[in-house]
Amino acid sequence: MGDQSFPLERSWYIGNAFFAILYGLQISMFFQSVYYLSIGPGSRKSKTFYIGYSTVMLVLITFALACNQWFGEAMWIEHRDVEGGPAQFFADNIAAWYNTLGTSADVVANVLGDGLMLYRCYVFWEHVPLAMVLPSLLYLSSVAMGITMTIQSGLPGGDIFHGTTVNFGIPWVVLTIVFNILVTAMIAIRLLSMHSRANLVLGIDPTKRYTGLLAILVESALPFTLLGIVYLATYAKQIPESLALAGIWGAFVSLSPQAIILRVAMGAAFTREMVVRVSSGGGQSISGLIVERDVKRSSPSPV
């Protein structure tokens, strides 16, 4: 038989492979973040929070990856001879407890990741409180729908990929993607606005690492948002390739916030104090603040 007979298995295999690669990147970024947070300036409370947050995210994504691999091993090795083949095993066991555990881990990681994005958006838009109303409502709606979808995925016959009943997975993905599109746009707009202000005030741009292209990509989690849009399009149409995208998107659920934490740990992310100074036009103040942070970071820690 040709490859065209196995779209589901091929998609699941590719998704797991990319998930594993991105998981390795996640581990690398985690240890880098812990290292820079440990030796860098900042309050103990802030460092403890970011290290604890990163640890929880790593544990959750480990569970998600392990459950996906477990299901693949059962489908292709332990029960490869079931009537109907791996595709039938997939359909019959999609609601298995370990699959529900993996889904729950990914949903919780998404809730935490979106929570960090909401906070970072608040850092940039604190001066306009009303701007945070819609993102907050979308976030709460996404959390509620994520819980509902997780419960559905654990019920008998709860196939959130090819189910024939009401599928709460689609509205959850829609709410999550809309939330990320909105927050991504809001953060990107503020970064571009502050970039222009820094240029006007200082003549040169000492804050390029804070407002440059890389900063916009990471701070706004743009890759995660764009990937989510593509995943939603294939998932809503129940295209088999959506399984591969689900694995990749699921990895970015924790990878994107970890990238933000790494920038914070390296002193390359905007803080609330820096946003206030740039917004108020205090060019010399922000320049001095950046230099002060760099000096602290390069100085040896006291024994």
Image (spheres, rainbow, N blue to C red):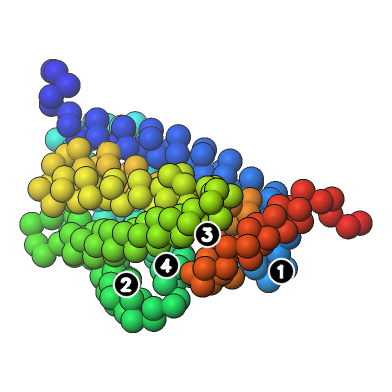
Task: Decide if residue 7 is on the left or right side of residue 225.
Answer: left
* Numbered label attached to residue 186: none
Earlier sequence position, callout 1 versus callout 2: 1
* Above or below 74: residue 50: below
Residue type at numbered disc 3: Val
Which numbered mark, 3 or 2, is in the foreground of this view?
Answer: 3
* Above or below 43: residue 234: above
Residue that mark 2 sits on:
135
Which numbered mark, 4 or 3, is in the foreground of this view?
Answer: 3
Measure the alpha-carbon separation of dots 1 and 3.
30 Å
Residue that mark 4 sits on:
121
* Above or below 223: residue 196: below
Is disc 1 placed on a helix, strand or loop? loop
Earlier sequence position, callout 3 versus callout 2: 2
Closest to the observer, 2 or 48: 48
Residue type at numbered disc 2: Pro
Closest to the observer, 248 or 149: 248
Residue that mark 1 sits on:
43
**At 52% across and 38% down in the image, what residue appears?**
24
Residue type at numbered disc 4: Cys
**At 52% across and 44% down in the image, what residue appears?**
26
